[in-house]
Amino acid sequence: MTEEEFDDLRRPAFAIAYRMLGSVSEAEDVVQEGFLRLHRAREGGERIESPRAYLSTVVSRLSLDHLRSARVRRETYVGEWLPEPLVASADDDPARKAEMADSLSLAFLVLLESLSPEQRAAFLLREVFDEPYDRIAEIVGTSEQNARQLATRARRHVEEGRPRFEASREQREELATRFFAAVEEGDLEGLEELLAHDVVFRADGGGKAPAAARALYGRASVARALTAGLRTGASFGLTWCRADVNGQPGAVFLDREGRLISVMVLDVAEGQIQGVSAIVNPDKLRHLGPVGDLGALMRERS
């Protein structure tokens, strides 16, 4: 298999696994196992007409099995659980960034967490990857009729949880620019104007980095927490730069040595910022590069 063929197969397989699991590391493990099974099948003389279809089926089944067991682990997760972020590189083309924005936003992935593993699989395979119901039924291990019901119920639940009016890329960028300027300047009044009344702030430390144990709600509380947090970070020598995170506007925060401390992402819809998420769990940042120690910085400062 050439490198080009490998990439052509890997990208759609990873797209399925990541959306299913919300974890870069787990998705990569699943895709690696999928390629191993594909290799073994070929070595064993099995006739595979479409390696892509074979791999997507195997990866979907492995992801479903993994998701079933992951639900138990997440019940004991410390604090708020957020997906591992994907940060777009500077050379990613606009079409790829648009693709990420459609079905990879952290808000969307968090919403999928409320579905059963079977509903999540049926919904993603149908709505995102346009798989026929007979294949979905085969992957999930059910009848075609039940696969349709799973997808329909999941679609209804997702539509109820999604905002009525999605923002354009231009609107997201404009609001994000004003948001980060207001936070940096400590402009509470200006910041509150950008936030929805029921805005939510979530921070995922996983018990391995300092983070709020529970989500914060309401524009006043969130605005105060954000400005105080950025002010505290600056006193630790943290710097930040804007970034595309899962297709949405965000930022990465670095320590003095350029090591990653946090990734922040904004959920923009209906003309306002509906949510702010911060991932500080070092285990969820390692795929992006060297990771710093926020706890050590805080202890050193105190």
Image: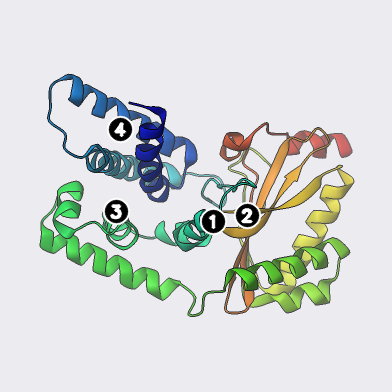
Q: Do labels 4 and 1 touch, CB within 8 Å?
A: no
**Picture residue at 37% right of the left edge, 29% below the top:** 32
**Nearer the N terminus, badge 3 or badge 2?**
3
Q: Secondary structure at mark 4?
A: helix
> Is 179 situated left or right of 49 in this image?
right
Q: Which mark is residue 34?
A: 4
Kind of residue at disc 1: Lys
Q: Do labels 1 and 2 touch, CB within 8 Å?
A: yes
**Nearer the N terminus, badge 1 or badge 2?**
1
**Nearer the N terminus, badge 2 or badge 4?**
4
Kind of residue at disc 3: Ala
Q: Say which quadrant the N terminus sits in.
A: top left
Q: Is residue 79 above or below residue 3?
A: below
Q: What is the C-alpha distance between the residues marked 1 and 2?
A: 8 Å
What residue did someone put label 1 on?
97
Please name whichever residue, 108 or 77, is drawn nearer the observer in this view of the structure. 108
What residue did someone put label 3 on?
121
**Nearer the N terminus, badge 4 or badge 3?**
4
> Is 22 situated left or right of 250 in this image?
left
Crowding at dot 1, Cα within 10 Å, few <14 / some 14-19 / many 20+, comes out as some
Q: What is the C-alpha distance between the residues marked 3 and 2?
A: 26 Å
Q: Which mark is residue 244?
A: 2
Please name whichever residue, 214 or 236, is drawn nearer the observer in this view of the structure. 236
Q: Is residue 272 visible?
A: yes
**Nearer the N terminus, badge 1 or badge 3?**
1
